[in-house]
Amino acid sequence: NLMFSSLPPPDPDPPNLPKPWECPLPEYDFKKCSCPPCKGNAHDGWDSTSNPHHDASNLPVPRVRKEWREHTKDEIDRYACALNVMSNISTEAGRQCYGSTYVYFPDIVMKHACVASDPRGDQGHRGPEFMLFHKSTLLTYEGSILAIDPKIKAIPWWNMPLDSAPVLDVNGTVKHKAGKYYCPKNDSTSHPFGVGSPEDDPSVANPGCNHSKYIWSDTYFGEQLGSGPNYEVTNGRWAYRTMARWGDFDTTYWSQDDKHDVNNECIVNRYFTPQSAMPISSTTGLRKNPSFYKNQLDPDTMLLTHDQLNQNCVRCCDVHKDGTDMNCMCQPDEHVDIYMRGPTLDTQTCSPYVTRNPNGRGDPMLKGTVGRTIINGVGNASNILFGGNGRSQQDSLIRYTQHDFDACANSNNTRNWIEWQNCQEENEAGSLEGVYCPAGKETCTQQDLEKVYALHSTGHDKTLGEIGDVTTSPSDPALFFSYHAYIDKNFMEWQESMKKEGRFVDHLKLELNDQEPPGPGLSADYFGYPRQATHEEWL
Protein backbone atom coordinates (compact mmCIF):
# COMPACT_ATOMS: atom_id res chain seq x y z
CA ASN A 1 0.00 0.00 0.00
CA LEU A 2 1.12 3.56 -0.73
CA MET A 3 0.31 6.58 1.40
CA PHE A 4 1.27 10.25 1.28
CA SER A 5 1.67 12.53 4.21
CA SER A 6 -0.45 15.64 4.14
CA LEU A 7 0.98 19.10 3.74
CA PRO A 8 0.71 21.44 6.71
CA PRO A 9 -2.32 23.71 6.35
CA PRO A 10 -1.70 27.25 5.12
CA ASP A 11 -1.83 30.11 7.53
CA PRO A 12 -5.39 31.35 7.99
CA ASP A 13 -6.37 34.38 6.00
CA PRO A 14 -6.25 37.60 7.98
CA PRO A 15 -9.50 39.08 9.27
CA ASN A 16 -11.40 41.51 7.07
CA LEU A 17 -9.97 40.04 3.87
CA PRO A 18 -10.45 42.52 1.01
CA LYS A 19 -13.40 41.68 -1.17
CA PRO A 20 -12.97 42.23 -4.92
CA TRP A 21 -15.83 43.59 -6.97
CA GLU A 22 -18.31 40.89 -7.97
CA CYS A 23 -20.14 40.87 -11.29
CA PRO A 24 -23.83 41.59 -10.63
CA LEU A 25 -25.07 40.12 -13.93
CA PRO A 26 -26.52 36.62 -13.35
CA GLU A 27 -25.53 35.42 -16.81
CA TYR A 28 -21.86 35.79 -15.81
CA ASP A 29 -22.06 33.26 -12.98
CA PHE A 30 -19.44 30.53 -13.55
CA LYS A 31 -21.61 28.16 -11.50
CA LYS A 32 -24.28 28.28 -14.23
CA CYS A 33 -22.03 27.54 -17.20
CA SER A 34 -18.31 27.16 -17.81
CA CYS A 35 -18.18 29.74 -20.62
CA PRO A 36 -20.19 32.77 -19.50
CA PRO A 37 -22.27 34.69 -20.37
CA CYS A 38 -24.97 32.05 -20.00
CA LYS A 39 -28.63 31.91 -20.93
CA GLY A 40 -31.53 29.97 -19.46
CA ASN A 41 -32.87 26.95 -21.30
CA ALA A 42 -36.24 25.20 -21.44
CA HIS A 43 -35.17 22.74 -18.75
CA ASP A 44 -34.60 25.41 -16.08
CA GLY A 45 -30.88 25.11 -16.64
CA TRP A 46 -28.28 27.32 -18.24
CA ASP A 47 -26.35 27.12 -21.51
CA SER A 48 -23.39 29.14 -22.68
CA THR A 49 -23.96 31.78 -25.35
CA SER A 50 -20.34 31.57 -26.49
CA ASN A 51 -19.26 30.78 -30.04
CA PRO A 52 -16.17 28.53 -30.32
CA HIS A 53 -16.00 29.32 -34.06
CA HIS A 54 -15.83 33.08 -33.51
CA ASP A 55 -13.04 34.78 -35.46
CA ALA A 56 -12.14 38.27 -36.63
CA SER A 57 -14.83 38.18 -39.29
CA ASN A 58 -17.45 38.10 -36.53
CA LEU A 59 -16.32 41.40 -35.00
CA PRO A 60 -18.81 44.25 -35.53
CA VAL A 61 -18.03 46.61 -38.41
CA PRO A 62 -17.68 49.39 -37.72
CA ARG A 63 -16.92 49.24 -34.02
CA VAL A 64 -18.14 52.50 -32.49
CA ARG A 65 -16.24 53.27 -29.31
CA LYS A 66 -18.17 55.40 -26.83
CA GLU A 67 -16.74 57.65 -24.11
CA TRP A 68 -17.24 56.39 -20.54
CA ARG A 69 -19.93 58.96 -19.77
CA GLU A 70 -21.97 57.77 -22.77
CA HIS A 71 -22.30 54.27 -21.30
CA THR A 72 -25.11 53.05 -19.09
CA LYS A 73 -24.46 51.31 -15.77
CA ASP A 74 -25.44 47.98 -17.32
CA GLU A 75 -23.01 48.47 -20.22
CA ILE A 76 -20.13 49.25 -17.85
CA ASP A 77 -21.02 46.26 -15.66
CA ARG A 78 -21.06 44.03 -18.74
CA TYR A 79 -17.61 45.28 -19.81
CA ALA A 80 -16.16 44.70 -16.33
CA CYS A 81 -17.76 41.24 -16.14
CA ALA A 82 -16.23 40.24 -19.49
CA LEU A 83 -12.83 41.42 -18.29
CA ASN A 84 -13.19 39.21 -15.21
CA VAL A 85 -13.78 36.23 -17.52
CA MET A 86 -10.77 37.22 -19.61
CA SER A 87 -8.64 37.29 -16.44
CA ASN A 88 -9.65 33.79 -15.33
CA ILE A 89 -9.71 31.56 -18.44
CA SER A 90 -6.47 30.67 -20.25
CA THR A 91 -6.00 31.39 -23.93
CA GLU A 92 -6.21 27.69 -24.85
CA ALA A 93 -9.36 27.03 -22.81
CA GLY A 94 -10.91 30.35 -23.77
CA ARG A 95 -10.56 29.71 -27.50
CA GLN A 96 -12.52 26.48 -27.08
CA CYS A 97 -15.30 28.67 -25.64
CA TYR A 98 -15.02 31.94 -27.54
CA GLY A 99 -13.02 31.33 -30.70
CA SER A 100 -9.71 32.48 -32.12
CA THR A 101 -9.79 36.16 -31.10
CA TYR A 102 -9.89 35.31 -27.39
CA VAL A 103 -6.65 35.97 -25.45
CA TYR A 104 -6.03 35.46 -21.73
CA PHE A 105 -5.42 38.82 -20.05
CA PRO A 106 -2.03 37.90 -18.47
CA ASP A 107 -0.81 36.96 -21.96
CA ILE A 108 -1.56 40.50 -23.16
CA VAL A 109 0.35 41.96 -20.18
CA MET A 110 3.27 39.60 -20.83
CA LYS A 111 3.41 40.51 -24.52
CA HIS A 112 3.57 44.22 -23.64
CA ALA A 113 6.33 43.44 -21.13
CA CYS A 114 8.33 41.42 -23.68
CA VAL A 115 8.15 44.22 -26.26
CA ALA A 116 9.17 46.90 -23.75
CA SER A 117 12.09 44.89 -22.32
CA ASP A 118 13.53 43.53 -25.58
CA PRO A 119 17.36 43.49 -25.20
CA ARG A 120 17.69 45.29 -28.56
CA GLY A 121 15.80 48.21 -27.03
CA ASP A 122 12.17 49.00 -26.35
CA GLN A 123 10.24 47.89 -29.45
CA GLY A 124 6.96 49.58 -28.51
CA HIS A 125 7.68 53.07 -27.21
CA ARG A 126 9.35 56.35 -28.14
CA GLY A 127 9.49 55.75 -31.86
CA PRO A 128 7.27 55.34 -34.92
CA GLU A 129 6.48 51.81 -33.72
CA PHE A 130 4.63 53.25 -30.69
CA MET A 131 1.29 53.73 -32.40
CA LEU A 132 1.26 50.53 -34.43
CA PHE A 133 2.16 48.32 -31.47
CA HIS A 134 -0.40 49.88 -29.14
CA LYS A 135 -3.10 49.93 -31.83
CA SER A 136 -2.45 46.21 -32.29
CA THR A 137 -2.57 45.65 -28.52
CA LEU A 138 -5.91 47.48 -28.29
CA LEU A 139 -7.34 45.42 -31.13
CA THR A 140 -6.20 42.19 -29.48
CA TYR A 141 -7.78 43.25 -26.19
CA GLU A 142 -10.97 44.48 -27.84
CA GLY A 143 -11.26 41.34 -29.96
CA SER A 144 -11.01 39.20 -26.84
CA ILE A 145 -13.63 41.23 -24.94
CA LEU A 146 -16.06 41.06 -27.88
CA ALA A 147 -15.48 37.33 -28.34
CA ILE A 148 -16.75 36.89 -24.80
CA ASP A 149 -19.72 39.24 -25.15
CA PRO A 150 -20.56 40.79 -28.56
CA LYS A 151 -23.22 42.93 -26.86
CA ILE A 152 -20.40 45.18 -25.61
CA LYS A 153 -19.80 46.27 -29.25
CA ALA A 154 -16.56 48.19 -28.52
CA ILE A 155 -14.29 49.12 -25.61
CA PRO A 156 -14.80 52.54 -23.95
CA TRP A 157 -12.44 55.48 -24.37
CA TRP A 158 -11.60 58.30 -21.96
CA ASN A 159 -11.92 61.94 -23.03
CA MET A 160 -9.19 63.23 -20.71
CA PRO A 161 -9.90 66.99 -21.05
CA LEU A 162 -13.34 66.47 -19.53
CA ASP A 163 -11.66 65.66 -16.19
CA SER A 164 -8.77 68.12 -16.44
CA ALA A 165 -7.94 70.53 -13.66
CA PRO A 166 -7.59 74.18 -14.74
CA VAL A 167 -4.35 75.04 -16.51
CA LEU A 168 -2.71 77.93 -14.72
CA ASP A 169 -0.29 80.62 -15.84
CA VAL A 170 2.88 81.18 -13.84
CA ASN A 171 1.14 83.94 -11.88
CA GLY A 172 -1.63 81.54 -10.85
CA THR A 173 -4.35 82.88 -13.12
CA VAL A 174 -6.45 80.45 -15.14
CA LYS A 175 -5.28 79.93 -18.72
CA HIS A 176 -7.65 77.05 -19.55
CA LYS A 177 -10.66 76.37 -17.37
CA ALA A 178 -11.32 73.01 -15.74
CA GLY A 179 -12.98 70.21 -17.69
CA LYS A 180 -16.73 69.69 -17.65
CA TYR A 181 -16.57 66.78 -15.16
CA TYR A 182 -13.61 67.90 -13.00
CA CYS A 183 -14.86 67.19 -9.48
CA PRO A 184 -12.37 65.60 -7.07
CA LYS A 185 -13.44 65.20 -3.48
CA ASN A 186 -11.55 67.75 -1.45
CA ASP A 187 -10.73 65.54 1.50
CA SER A 188 -7.70 63.81 2.96
CA THR A 189 -8.71 60.28 2.01
CA SER A 190 -9.57 60.58 -1.66
CA HIS A 191 -7.71 63.64 -2.93
CA PRO A 192 -4.18 62.60 -3.89
CA PHE A 193 -2.58 65.95 -4.33
CA GLY A 194 -3.80 68.65 -2.02
CA VAL A 195 -5.03 71.86 -3.55
CA GLY A 196 -2.04 73.31 -5.38
CA SER A 197 -3.84 76.59 -5.96
CA PRO A 198 -7.15 78.09 -4.82
CA GLU A 199 -8.18 77.84 -8.48
CA ASP A 200 -7.89 74.03 -8.28
CA ASP A 201 -10.59 73.75 -5.63
CA PRO A 202 -13.54 72.11 -7.45
CA SER A 203 -15.98 74.49 -5.75
CA VAL A 204 -14.10 77.31 -7.49
CA ALA A 205 -13.04 75.59 -10.71
CA ASN A 206 -16.34 73.81 -11.38
CA PRO A 207 -19.10 74.99 -9.01
CA GLY A 208 -21.95 72.55 -8.55
CA CYS A 209 -20.06 69.67 -10.18
CA ASN A 210 -21.30 66.09 -9.81
CA HIS A 211 -18.59 63.80 -8.40
CA SER A 212 -20.31 60.69 -9.77
CA LYS A 213 -19.55 61.94 -13.32
CA TYR A 214 -15.86 62.44 -12.50
CA ILE A 215 -13.69 59.71 -14.03
CA TRP A 216 -11.97 59.04 -10.68
CA SER A 217 -15.23 58.08 -8.99
CA ASP A 218 -16.52 54.59 -8.27
CA THR A 219 -18.85 55.03 -11.26
CA TYR A 220 -15.89 54.70 -13.66
CA PHE A 221 -12.19 54.20 -12.77
CA GLY A 222 -12.42 54.27 -8.98
CA GLU A 223 -10.00 56.27 -6.89
CA GLN A 224 -6.89 57.85 -8.42
CA LEU A 225 -4.99 57.28 -5.18
CA GLY A 226 -5.46 53.76 -3.87
CA SER A 227 -6.69 53.94 -0.28
CA GLY A 228 -5.61 50.40 0.65
CA PRO A 229 -2.63 49.82 2.98
CA ASN A 230 -0.33 49.50 -0.05
CA TYR A 231 -2.22 51.94 -2.30
CA GLU A 232 -4.58 49.27 -3.59
CA VAL A 233 -7.68 50.51 -5.42
CA THR A 234 -10.53 49.76 -3.00
CA ASN A 235 -13.69 51.15 -4.65
CA GLY A 236 -15.72 50.71 -7.81
CA ARG A 237 -15.59 47.86 -10.29
CA TRP A 238 -11.80 47.59 -10.11
CA ALA A 239 -11.62 47.23 -6.33
CA TYR A 240 -8.91 44.78 -5.26
CA ARG A 241 -8.32 43.60 -8.80
CA THR A 242 -5.89 40.68 -8.61
CA MET A 243 -2.45 41.03 -10.17
CA ALA A 244 -1.17 38.28 -12.46
CA ARG A 245 1.87 36.37 -11.29
CA TRP A 246 4.84 35.93 -13.60
CA GLY A 247 4.03 32.25 -14.22
CA ASP A 248 0.34 32.84 -14.98
CA PHE A 249 0.79 33.14 -18.76
CA ASP A 250 -0.64 30.36 -20.94
CA THR A 251 2.24 28.09 -21.98
CA THR A 252 0.49 27.04 -25.19
CA TYR A 253 0.19 30.68 -26.27
CA TRP A 254 3.95 31.09 -25.89
CA SER A 255 4.94 27.86 -27.67
CA GLN A 256 5.83 27.52 -31.33
CA ASP A 257 5.25 23.81 -31.76
CA ASP A 258 2.75 21.09 -30.92
CA LYS A 259 4.63 19.96 -27.81
CA HIS A 260 3.35 23.00 -25.90
CA ASP A 261 6.79 23.60 -24.41
CA VAL A 262 7.47 27.27 -23.86
CA ASN A 263 10.06 28.16 -26.48
CA ASN A 264 9.27 31.80 -27.10
CA GLU A 265 12.54 33.73 -27.04
CA CYS A 266 11.23 36.34 -24.63
CA ILE A 267 10.21 33.76 -22.04
CA VAL A 268 13.18 31.43 -22.46
CA ASN A 269 15.75 34.23 -22.33
CA ARG A 270 13.81 36.16 -19.68
CA TYR A 271 13.61 39.49 -21.46
CA PHE A 272 11.24 40.48 -18.72
CA THR A 273 12.21 39.60 -15.16
CA PRO A 274 9.56 40.92 -12.78
CA GLN A 275 10.77 42.94 -9.85
CA SER A 276 9.39 45.54 -7.54
CA ALA A 277 10.78 48.99 -6.84
CA MET A 278 12.97 50.13 -4.00
CA PRO A 279 13.68 53.72 -2.92
CA ILE A 280 17.30 54.61 -3.60
CA SER A 281 19.26 57.76 -4.31
CA SER A 282 18.73 58.61 -7.92
CA THR A 283 18.97 61.73 -10.04
CA THR A 284 15.82 60.62 -11.85
CA GLY A 285 13.84 60.02 -8.70
CA LEU A 286 12.97 56.53 -9.96
CA ARG A 287 12.85 53.73 -7.44
CA LYS A 288 15.00 51.17 -9.17
CA ASN A 289 17.52 48.99 -7.36
CA PRO A 290 20.61 48.01 -9.39
CA SER A 291 21.41 45.22 -6.93
CA PHE A 292 18.32 43.22 -7.84
CA TYR A 293 20.29 40.26 -9.11
CA LYS A 294 22.74 40.18 -6.19
CA ASN A 295 22.28 38.17 -3.02
CA GLN A 296 21.67 40.43 -0.05
CA LEU A 297 22.13 38.29 3.09
CA ASP A 298 21.97 39.30 6.70
CA PRO A 299 25.44 38.31 8.02
CA ASP A 300 23.96 37.14 11.32
CA THR A 301 21.03 35.06 10.09
CA MET A 302 22.24 34.33 6.52
CA LEU A 303 18.69 35.04 5.37
CA LEU A 304 17.60 37.37 2.63
CA THR A 305 17.16 40.88 3.96
CA HIS A 306 13.67 42.34 4.02
CA ASP A 307 14.73 44.81 1.33
CA GLN A 308 15.56 41.93 -0.97
CA LEU A 309 12.22 40.31 -0.21
CA ASN A 310 10.45 43.49 -1.23
CA GLN A 311 12.62 43.77 -4.32
CA ASN A 312 11.54 40.36 -5.58
CA CYS A 313 7.87 40.70 -4.59
CA VAL A 314 8.07 37.21 -3.11
CA ARG A 315 5.22 35.03 -1.95
CA CYS A 316 7.36 32.13 -0.76
CA CYS A 317 5.43 31.76 2.49
CA ASP A 318 2.09 32.47 0.86
CA VAL A 319 1.84 36.11 1.77
CA HIS A 320 -1.52 37.03 3.20
CA LYS A 321 -3.94 38.42 0.67
CA ASP A 322 -4.06 41.85 2.27
CA GLY A 323 -0.71 42.59 0.65
CA THR A 324 1.46 42.60 3.79
CA ASP A 325 4.61 40.51 4.00
CA MET A 326 6.45 41.98 6.99
CA ASN A 327 6.81 38.56 8.63
CA CYS A 328 7.73 36.67 5.50
CA MET A 329 11.36 35.52 5.43
CA CYS A 330 12.76 32.98 2.97
CA GLN A 331 15.92 30.99 2.54
CA PRO A 332 17.95 32.10 -0.53
CA ASP A 333 17.40 28.81 -2.36
CA GLU A 334 13.63 28.69 -1.88
CA HIS A 335 11.40 28.94 -4.92
CA VAL A 336 9.35 32.12 -5.05
CA ASP A 337 6.36 33.35 -6.97
CA ILE A 338 6.59 36.87 -8.33
CA TYR A 339 3.84 39.23 -9.39
CA MET A 340 4.00 40.64 -12.89
CA ARG A 341 5.55 43.97 -12.01
CA GLY A 342 8.49 45.52 -13.80
CA PRO A 343 11.67 47.46 -13.07
CA THR A 344 10.21 50.98 -13.13
CA LEU A 345 7.32 50.34 -10.76
CA ASP A 346 6.63 53.27 -8.46
CA THR A 347 4.83 51.52 -5.65
CA GLN A 348 7.03 49.72 -3.14
CA THR A 349 4.70 46.81 -2.53
CA CYS A 350 4.17 43.13 -3.00
CA SER A 351 0.42 43.50 -2.89
CA PRO A 352 -1.59 40.95 -4.87
CA TYR A 353 -3.84 43.78 -6.03
CA VAL A 354 -3.63 46.62 -8.55
CA THR A 355 -2.23 49.79 -7.00
CA ARG A 356 -2.36 53.50 -7.84
CA ASN A 357 -0.12 56.03 -6.17
CA PRO A 358 0.19 59.45 -7.89
CA ASN A 359 2.86 60.46 -5.34
CA GLY A 360 4.96 57.35 -5.96
CA ARG A 361 7.93 59.11 -7.52
CA GLY A 362 8.49 61.68 -4.86
CA ASP A 363 10.78 64.62 -5.37
CA PRO A 364 14.08 63.87 -3.56
CA MET A 365 13.73 67.26 -1.83
CA LEU A 366 10.47 66.04 -0.28
CA LYS A 367 11.65 62.67 1.02
CA GLY A 368 9.78 61.71 4.11
CA THR A 369 6.90 64.01 3.22
CA VAL A 370 5.75 62.52 -0.05
CA GLY A 371 2.54 60.51 -0.18
CA ARG A 372 0.28 60.35 2.84
CA THR A 373 1.71 63.49 4.39
CA ILE A 374 0.90 65.52 1.33
CA ILE A 375 -2.59 64.12 1.26
CA ASN A 376 -3.17 64.92 4.90
CA GLY A 377 -2.16 68.47 4.13
CA VAL A 378 -5.25 69.13 2.06
CA GLY A 379 -6.89 72.33 3.16
CA ASN A 380 -3.96 73.33 5.36
CA ALA A 381 -2.04 76.01 3.54
CA SER A 382 1.09 75.54 5.64
CA ASN A 383 1.37 71.88 4.58
CA ILE A 384 0.45 72.15 0.91
CA LEU A 385 3.34 70.96 -1.23
CA PHE A 386 3.49 71.67 -4.92
CA GLY A 387 4.82 68.46 -6.36
CA GLY A 388 4.23 65.13 -4.76
CA ASN A 389 5.02 63.64 -8.17
CA GLY A 390 8.77 64.04 -8.50
CA ARG A 391 8.78 62.52 -11.99
CA SER A 392 6.89 65.43 -13.43
CA GLN A 393 8.05 68.08 -10.94
CA GLN A 394 4.39 69.09 -10.77
CA ASP A 395 1.36 68.22 -8.72
CA SER A 396 -0.61 65.11 -9.56
CA LEU A 397 -3.55 66.90 -11.13
CA ILE A 398 -4.15 66.09 -14.78
CA ARG A 399 -4.08 69.29 -16.84
CA TYR A 400 -4.60 68.08 -20.39
CA THR A 401 -6.77 70.20 -22.68
CA GLN A 402 -8.60 69.97 -25.99
CA HIS A 403 -6.02 72.42 -27.37
CA ASP A 404 -3.26 69.88 -26.63
CA PHE A 405 -5.24 67.17 -28.42
CA ASP A 406 -6.01 69.30 -31.48
CA ALA A 407 -2.44 70.60 -31.84
CA CYS A 408 -1.04 67.07 -32.14
CA ALA A 409 -3.78 65.86 -34.49
CA ASN A 410 -3.11 68.75 -36.91
CA SER A 411 -0.73 67.48 -39.61
CA ASN A 412 0.42 71.05 -40.27
CA ASN A 413 2.12 70.76 -36.86
CA THR A 414 3.08 67.09 -37.00
CA ARG A 415 3.89 66.25 -40.61
CA ASN A 416 5.13 62.70 -40.18
CA TRP A 417 4.69 59.81 -37.81
CA ILE A 418 7.67 60.51 -35.56
CA GLU A 419 6.66 64.17 -35.16
CA TRP A 420 3.19 62.98 -34.14
CA GLN A 421 4.78 60.60 -31.62
CA ASN A 422 6.95 63.41 -30.22
CA CYS A 423 3.76 65.34 -29.55
CA GLN A 424 2.35 62.46 -27.47
CA GLU A 425 5.47 61.72 -25.43
CA GLU A 426 7.45 63.98 -23.13
CA ASN A 427 10.40 65.63 -24.85
CA GLU A 428 12.53 65.77 -21.72
CA ALA A 429 12.31 63.36 -18.80
CA GLY A 430 10.06 64.66 -16.08
CA SER A 431 8.58 67.54 -18.06
CA LEU A 432 5.37 65.83 -19.30
CA GLU A 433 5.68 68.21 -22.27
CA GLY A 434 5.31 67.02 -25.84
CA VAL A 435 6.59 69.23 -28.66
CA TYR A 436 5.75 70.09 -32.26
CA CYS A 437 7.09 72.36 -34.97
CA PRO A 438 4.19 74.76 -35.60
CA ALA A 439 2.50 75.28 -38.94
CA GLY A 440 4.27 77.84 -41.09
CA LYS A 441 7.78 76.72 -40.12
CA GLU A 442 9.66 74.33 -42.35
CA THR A 443 12.30 73.57 -39.73
CA CYS A 444 12.52 74.22 -36.00
CA THR A 445 15.31 74.64 -33.52
CA GLN A 446 14.70 73.35 -30.01
CA GLN A 447 13.72 76.89 -29.04
CA ASP A 448 11.15 77.12 -31.84
CA LEU A 449 9.21 74.05 -30.74
CA GLU A 450 5.75 74.59 -29.28
CA LYS A 451 4.86 72.64 -26.14
CA VAL A 452 1.74 70.73 -25.14
CA TYR A 453 0.90 68.35 -22.34
CA ALA A 454 2.04 64.95 -23.61
CA LEU A 455 -1.03 62.71 -23.75
CA HIS A 456 0.75 59.38 -23.35
CA SER A 457 3.15 60.52 -20.64
CA THR A 458 0.35 62.23 -18.72
CA GLY A 459 -1.79 59.09 -18.71
CA HIS A 460 1.01 57.11 -17.06
CA ASP A 461 2.77 59.60 -14.83
CA LYS A 462 -0.20 61.31 -13.23
CA THR A 463 -1.48 58.06 -11.71
CA LEU A 464 1.52 55.75 -11.26
CA GLY A 465 1.25 52.52 -9.31
CA GLU A 466 0.90 49.74 -11.88
CA ILE A 467 0.35 52.24 -14.69
CA GLY A 468 3.71 53.86 -13.90
CA ASP A 469 5.70 50.81 -14.97
CA VAL A 470 6.49 50.87 -18.69
CA THR A 471 6.59 47.08 -18.97
CA THR A 472 3.42 45.93 -17.22
CA SER A 473 1.18 49.03 -17.28
CA PRO A 474 -1.76 47.13 -18.91
CA SER A 475 -2.23 45.55 -15.46
CA ASP A 476 -4.58 48.48 -14.71
CA PRO A 477 -6.88 47.77 -17.67
CA ALA A 478 -9.70 50.27 -17.05
CA LEU A 479 -7.20 53.11 -17.23
CA PHE A 480 -4.63 51.75 -19.70
CA PHE A 481 -6.95 50.70 -22.51
CA SER A 482 -9.25 53.72 -22.11
CA TYR A 483 -6.62 56.40 -22.57
CA HIS A 484 -4.81 54.39 -25.23
CA ALA A 485 -8.13 54.32 -27.08
CA TYR A 486 -8.06 58.14 -26.78
CA ILE A 487 -4.55 58.17 -28.26
CA ASP A 488 -5.92 55.92 -31.01
CA LYS A 489 -8.59 58.56 -31.65
CA ASN A 490 -5.93 61.27 -31.91
CA PHE A 491 -3.99 59.15 -34.39
CA MET A 492 -7.11 58.64 -36.52
CA GLU A 493 -7.76 62.38 -36.60
CA TRP A 494 -4.11 62.95 -37.56
CA GLN A 495 -4.46 60.50 -40.44
CA GLU A 496 -7.57 62.33 -41.62
CA SER A 497 -5.67 65.61 -41.43
CA MET A 498 -2.79 64.12 -43.43
CA LYS A 499 -5.26 63.18 -46.17
CA LYS A 500 -7.05 66.54 -46.06
CA GLU A 501 -3.75 68.45 -46.34
CA GLY A 502 -2.57 66.34 -49.30
CA ARG A 503 0.14 64.54 -47.36
CA PHE A 504 -1.48 61.11 -47.52
CA VAL A 505 0.61 58.40 -49.18
CA ASP A 506 -0.92 55.12 -50.26
CA HIS A 507 0.76 52.73 -47.85
CA LEU A 508 0.07 49.77 -50.17
CA LYS A 509 2.39 51.18 -52.85
CA LEU A 510 5.84 50.59 -51.49
CA GLU A 511 7.82 52.06 -54.38
CA LEU A 512 8.71 55.61 -53.37
CA ASN A 513 7.94 57.10 -56.79
CA ASP A 514 5.01 54.86 -57.64
CA GLN A 515 2.24 56.98 -56.14
CA GLU A 516 -0.24 59.68 -57.07
CA PRO A 517 0.57 62.48 -56.64
CA PRO A 518 4.37 61.96 -56.70
CA GLY A 519 5.96 62.65 -53.34
CA PRO A 520 8.68 61.58 -50.93
CA GLY A 521 7.00 58.27 -50.23
CA LEU A 522 6.09 56.07 -47.33
CA SER A 523 9.30 56.31 -45.34
CA ALA A 524 9.50 60.08 -45.27
CA ASP A 525 5.81 60.77 -44.75
CA TYR A 526 5.21 58.16 -42.09
CA PHE A 527 8.52 57.23 -40.51
CA GLY A 528 10.32 60.44 -41.43
CA TYR A 529 12.75 62.36 -39.26
CA PRO A 530 11.55 65.47 -37.41
CA ARG A 531 11.85 68.79 -39.22
CA GLN A 532 14.16 70.30 -36.61
CA ALA A 533 16.94 68.08 -37.98
CA THR A 534 18.41 68.23 -41.46
CA HIS A 535 18.82 65.06 -43.48
CA GLU A 536 22.59 65.25 -43.06
CA GLU A 537 22.23 65.66 -39.28
CA TRP A 538 19.81 62.75 -39.17
CA LEU A 539 22.28 60.50 -41.01
Image: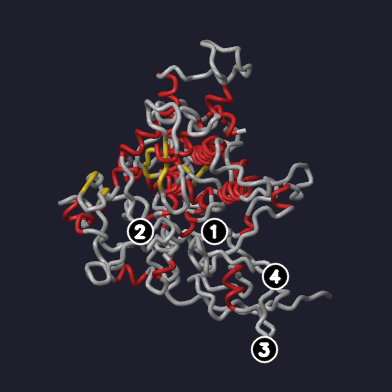
Mark closer to the observer (1, 2): 1
Q: Amino acid at mark 2?
A: Glu
Q: Is residue 444 left or right of residue 9?
A: left
Q: Quadrant of residue 306?
A: bottom right
> Considering the numbered disc 4 on the image, is that residue within a helix, a strand or a loop?
loop
| Rendered position, 510 above or below 121 | above
Mark closer to the observer (4, 1): 1
Q: Residue at x 44, y 68 (%)?
A: 364
Residue under pointer 4: 335
The circle drawn on residue 300 is 3
Q: Residues within 10 Å of mark 2 (few under 14, many from 20)?
A: many
Of residues 322 and 391, which is closer to you in this image?
391
Query: Could you say where residue 471 lies in the image, as x and y percent from the top left?
Result: 56, 52
> Considering the numbered disc 1 on the image, is that residue within a helix, a strand or a loop?
loop
Query: Could you say where residue 517 lies in the image, as x and y percent from the top left?
Result: 51, 11
Question: Marks 3 and 4, Cα distance to the nearest angstrom?
Answer: 22 Å
